[in-house]
Image (cartoon, rainbow, N blue to C red):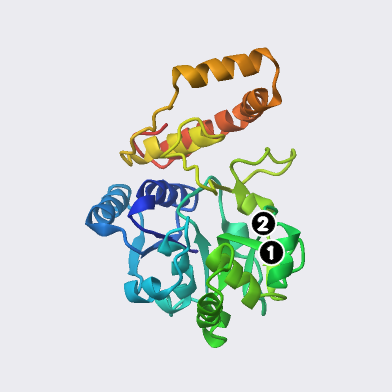
Amino acid sequence: MIIVTASDHHFVPGLLVLLYSAWLNNRTARLHVIDAGLGTDGTDRVTSLCARHGIDCRILRADADALARLPNPGHLTPATYARLFLPDLLPEHDRAIYIDSDALVIADLEPLWRMELGDELVAGVVDSEMRPVSLGKFGVPAGQYINAGVLLMNLERWREERIGPRCVDQLMRHPELEHADQTAINIVAKGRIRHLDRCFNFFAAKPLPKEGMDPRILHFAGPDKPWIRAGLLLGAIFDAYGRAAGAGISAPERAWSARSLRKTALGLLTLRPKYWRPLLRRAERRPFVRRQVRALATKATAAGLSGSA
């Protein structure tokens, strides 16, 4: 199994936890990190973590000049473009699982790895956040647009059909594309995308899945990251993996002020949904979080590791 991610120095905490979680739940996987600006400190932290746990991980160097020539993705970092260059960075492989560095692997990914792609270019989970109006501009039917945070990529077809360069061409001709390379992939691969079950790219801020569907990858999509903001829904699972990994990630502090405490208290007393809903969601998720933290401790112990959660 080949698992690839990409990161710059902004996402190093997430990267460390992703690498550890992917390895712990997929012990035979070969991991690769596309260095899109890790810096010396970031590279050293990745190398140290992998050496300490015996993780088979290889660092690939992205073409910094090629990344710099692409449009500024605004709230994203240029590292988002790194996946477009993956087929050429791994010429010896025909397929790979790509996972964003703000995600967390909590289960075996063998079902995803063994999925048949045939002539399809990529497999991903439908992104329900995209509005039908936006999809119409891209020529992508509603319910077909996928999130690029987790992808099973057909590297052989990407190389043969120059999918990466075609996505780059879309970006250069249309720098205003919403969600940058994610949208470019959807445009170029349209009609040749396999849709995955949501368990392979479960947005951590969303309501818990129905009974019978257990997430395999948690994705902390959006601006709020668990190493930056405290109290995120499912953030305790990230924290537990960080501790088990010995990643040395400082816990973010809750930014409570007297004013915000008064507003929250008043909102709860007056039964305003804006204030009660987060508490109800957190209570709803508590059994799932506890189950995942217990499972992590068991896996770490079985693997003979120290520092389990």
Residue 176's place in the image compared with 299, above or below, is below
- In the orientation shown, which residue stands out farthest toward the top? 269
Residue drawn at x 53%, y 64% as measured from the top left: 97
Q: CA distance from mark 2 to mark 1?
A: 6 Å
Name the one closer to the observer, 260 or 254: 260
Q: Are marks 2 and 1 in contact (CB under 8 Å)?
A: yes
Q: Of the numbered discs in the image, which one, if any, rests on residue 285? A: none
Residue 159's place in the image compared with 52, above or below, is below
Residue drawn at x 66%, y 22% as measured from the top left: 276
Residue 194 is situated, as x and y percent measured from the top left of the image, at 69, 68
Residue 28's place in the image compared with 159, above or below, is above
Q: Is residue 111 left or right of residue 223?
A: right
Which numbered disc, 2 or 1, marks the residue that appears first in the sequence? 2
Amino acid residing under circle 2:
Asp
Name the one closer to the observer, 289 or 228: 228
Residue 206 is situated, as x and y percent measured from the top left of the image, at 65, 41
Q: Residues within 10 Å of mark 1 (few under 14, many from 20)?
A: many
Q: Is residue 220 left or right of residue 70?
A: right
Residue drawn at x 66%, y 27% as measured from the top left: 274
Amino acid residing under circle 1:
Tyr
Residue under numbered circle 2: 127
Q: Of the numbered discs in the image, which one, if any, rests on residue 145? A: 1
